[in-house]
Image (spheres, rainbow, N blue to C red):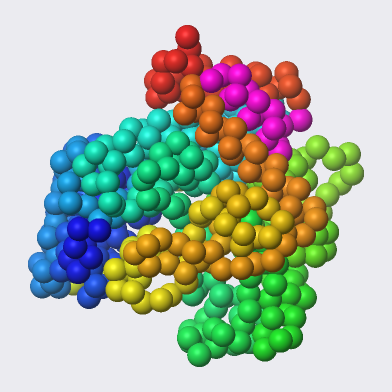
Amino acid sequence: MTNVQQPKVVVIGAGSLFFGRQAIWQMVHSPYLNTGTLALVDIDPIRMEKMGALAEKVVAETEVDLRIEATTDWRNALPGADFVVLSFAVDTVRYRGLDCQISEKYGIRMCSGDTIGPGGIFRAMRELPVIMNCVADIERFCPDAWVINYINPSAVNGIAIARYAPQVKSFALCDSLHMPHVKARYAVRAGIIADVSEWHDDLDADFDMRIAGVNHFTWMLKAEWRGREVSAKIAESLRRSAATEDLGGDRGAKALHNDAIAGQLYDIFGYIPTCVAHTKEYLRFYQGHGLSTEEIPPLSIWETDDRYARHAQMWRQVDDFNSGALPISTFMEALGPDHATDIIENMVGGLGQPFYINALNRGAVSNMSDDAFLELLCDIDVDGPRPRPVGPMPRGLRALNELVLDTHELTAEAIVRADYNLLRRALMTDPLTNSIADADAILRDLLAAERDVLPDHWYA
């Protein structure tokens, strides 16, 4: 790294409303980061101008020494970078909607559509070629920088960088298991504390919680409080809340029936799924194929219009901060920290905090290959993540995880090699595919619908 004391963090895709604002918050808030440089990159000049203006206003208000750069070309921002966070997407609301709507015609239902099923494959087809171009420039302009992939499908993209650009230092992230919040939430479910606000570091060593699996398909393989197993108590808490759980509200399809599904999967496999809003999409059980009436209905479909409305509301907040309609002094209370910049702070400051990170297994899950790309609790510093031992993945769950991994690895290889036969094989391997003819029709229809954003070689 060039200068870990005054780190330069480049955010490519700073117009991402789920990361850009939080990155500004953390870079200003952290004494380990706020004397460095935050370089914001977005190809949309209007969004870039808005986020750059917001960052400058927050820096002026807080009177920190953070330097702000803003550009529409990542090559201008990369020289001197210590960390490069990838957080971009091509009109993701629209295209995820197309992925989900067209797949539904052929019997595949997706509530999120960005990591598994046809949605995961086509999102990777849209984003991964750009990621690999970016990684090539990172190797050229800042070869010592850590590349942090924050773009779904996180595992597919992380696999591609690790396997096809191994000279670049990289790992991948998802905020669903953000520490210490995830541990605090399960401590409440286990009856260890009454509220997440009661969680503190002194309790951490007494709560042995081990989670592992492919991103969005992770499972709690151990939960012991002072030597006493508490998984059953957590599952019982999920069952109780399932009876009164909020069935979506304005949070959409991903929020529906999650506690009920978590309890049902615990009854089947004996382990608690830890990212149910996505995990339910990885399983054929919730596709509506059964003949019997189910307690839990088939997955609801990703809601395009509602998502556009939520994004518009977020941009109104940015506009209000920039115009003064919202006092910039309230920014630090309105926003909060982010998983990626939390980890960067930990790496720069040598804080010794563990985080869930998507990286190579390296023996952490003892009965899966060392190069399996898994989400694991890792110790991390400027030398990168080191997974903590987990033990074996239970039978059944190991088979399901291996199927997901094969799908992701085939997807990454197909896109990097521009190979349609491998792409088709990836979709035929995918756990949601039930018909060769329907899968071929999905490929045909989605290729036609998304031709404006996919590489020409798919149409050769």
Q: Position of residue 437 (x, y in %)?
A: 73, 18
Relative depth, front residue between 102 and 159 = 159
53 sits to left or right of 458: left
Quadrant position of the N terminus in the picture: bottom left
Q: In the image, is residue 426 part of the stretch drawn in magenta?
A: yes
Query: From the viewer's perspective, is residue 348 above or below residue 52?
Result: below
Query: From the viewer's perspective, is residue 317 above or below residue 103?
Result: below
The rendered magenta stretch, by its main secondary structure, is classed as helix
395 sits to left or right of 359: right
Q: Position of residue 183 (x, y in %)?
A: 56, 75
Query: From the viewer's perspective, is residue 205 above or below residue 254?
Result: below
Q: In the image, is residue 114 part of the stretch drawn in magenta?
A: no
427 sits to left or right of 195: right
Q: Which residues are magenta?
A: 419-434
Residue found at x 31% / y 36%: 136
Residue found at x 58% / y 37%: 409
